[in-house]
Amino acid sequence: MKPGMHRKKLNRISIAALVILAAALCFAGCGAGRGSTAAPSAGQSTNGARTAPSRLKPEEMAMLCYYRDVRDENFDADMEIVEGRIDALTDGKYLKEETALETPEGIRDAVSFYVPKEVYGKYSLRDISRMLISRPMNLWLCNDTSSGTWNNFTDQIALPRNAIESVEVLYGCPEHFNPMDYGIKLAEFNYLKITLTEEFCRKNPQIWEWKQPNILQDIEGFEGYAHIRVYPDAESRCMIFTESENRTGFSKTLYYSFTHEPLSDAFNLISYPVVEWESGETMKGAGQIENTGFNTVTMVNEYVPNEAYVSDKNWEQTLQAIRERLDASGIPYALGQRPGIDRSIVIRMEKGTFTDNFLDYATGNTTIELSSCGDSLTESSSGIRASVADRSGKKALALDMSALRKETFNKLSMNCVKKGGSRIVLSVNSNAVAYGYCDSMINDGKFVMDYNAITGENGFTGDSEWMPGFWAALVSGTQIPMLYSTTPAVTLENTEQIFLTEDGDPCVLEQYRIPRDKLYAVIESELGDLEYARIGILTTGKPCLQFSLPEGETRNEQIAAVMSRVFRQLEDEIFTYWMRFDFIDSSGMTQLMFLTHAPASGSKMKIGYSMYYDSGFTEEDEAEIRKLLTEDESLADLITAEQ
């Protein structure tokens, strides 16, 4: 599989779960008890543990763990701010524990906070932390001038803490505020009132004319930023934020953050939610084990149904299908459900190739296609019986077409033979997974695929030996009902082995063969005198390198020249890690992104890349940059051509 070049619009908020959370924070008002809320105070700790009601138990609570890293000198001061934010979020209902943690940088001091599950509800606790707790929370005011689905934030104005005169958490309806103008159906609701100083308003009078003012957090971050829509009240010099759902935790946390200094930097973070794991007689899978039975690093993935209602019959069939598929992998797993999330599925498996790349196959509906020489045959589970075969000591995938489908399959093979013989390929969800060569006419509808389409190897051996059984379970096993399609809600790793980057996003450590600081040194030595703005690690574990955006009529030529140099000089690093390259404007916001793709097989074939860009670039700019790179003779054997 050779990735081609694709163009997509650059969404400045790059984490989907964070967008959902931000939307919930920004656009919904709701009722609660009357009266103003006093300013929250930081939690008081005694011997490393907060005094809290006895009913709170760590094993029944979610955990957020922040650990000391390169910012040792700021850790204690930052932890006071973090604890103050958590105290405000939980209304004081949390537990605190000081501990030590093994990290990529060695053993580090850490502080764990246990919070009740009702604090985060249906949201990802990690995203709530990233929105409200673990970020520095440097602030900007801006105008959202977008007319479609893409945010187009303009006129960024720094909003320092000394420009905020006062902050109040209130209930009711602000003066000069018509809820119906903003789609709020309640007459009274919880809200945050942010009063700006006279001096700041005098210097920035345009903010009261903005169509959709927003408060942005940390716009210079690699992963995009959090944004909160606010409603202007020019007469009172106020910006209003409405609380979501029947609670005030988000408003109180923002209150604390807006009235205290920012963190020195974003924190490395561990997080995992409360999960009710299947145990004892409830475990029905052949490979299913107790959640406490793992002694290696694991991944925990959560999936939730897209449908608002899932029947008991469809739910049981879904669980049966998932168990069959996970059993076929031969890798031990545990199943659970997150309280309060209807029909959620939580899967824990040993960390490795399967859990990193194949869980989407295990938890979703599948489409099966057989193709050869331009002809294709789309199949359902009733059309094929699949099993594992042994070919000269190597595992293979054996297909046996049903009586109803033999004739159609025979025509596919006949056409293949007429064209001189070629491969018949099995694709699952449009991805080729196995193939076999068809050199003679097939009459009985039986066919053995002894090639691994993902690696191109003859036979499924070693780390791929489990694949034929897994594909067989997908092809002819129980299917997940069409009414139940799943999407990953959050991906977390197991307890003491969870590492997140400095921007608060998960990092898959096994992708790295050298430590992060040494990776930086390698990139610096390879690039030599080529200037870049900053380097860091992304959510996916990919390194990200940012360059200042060139200006003038030769902007596209300058960008192509930089990327040509990068592709040539960092060839080995791109194949090892995959990488992302950003061109950022003067405020640190990404305007153009190159995301590289190494071949799925891991072999050293050509590099593919995608281009994402914001409103400052057009399709014509993309075409020009792509043309310059395609015509660069020094890249002829290195990157893919346009497909």
Image (cartoon, grey):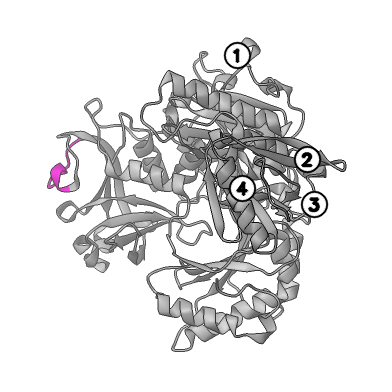
User: Which mark's residue is nearer the viewer, 3 or 4?
Assistant: 4
Query: What is the quadrant of residue 544 in the picture?
Result: bottom right
Q: Is residue 1 visible?
A: no
Query: Of the residues shown, which amino acid type is indicated by label 1?
Result: Thr
| Left or right for 146, reference 123 | left
Q: Which percent across, then down, holds residue 568?
A: 70, 77
Q: Which residue is mark 4?
A: 410
User: Which mark's residue is nearer the viewer, 2 or 3?
Assistant: 3
Q: Residues within 10 Å of mark 2 (few under 14, many from 20)?
A: some
- In the image, residue 567 lies in the stretch drawn in magenta: no
Q: Which percent across, then down, holds residue 519?
A: 73, 62
Which of the labelled discs sits on residue 458, or is there none? 3
Magenta segment, which residues?
Answer: 172-181
Q: Which residue is mark 2?
A: 465
Query: What is the quadrant of residue 389 in the picture?
Result: top right
User: Which mark's residue is nearer the viewer, 1 or 4?
Assistant: 4
User: Which mark's residue is nearer the viewer, 1 or 3?
Assistant: 3
Q: Residue at x 69, y 84 (%)?
A: 634
Which of the labelled discs sits on residue 282, or is there none? 1
Q: Residues within 10 Å of mark 3 (few under 14, many from 20)?
A: some
| Left or right for 518, reference 372 | right
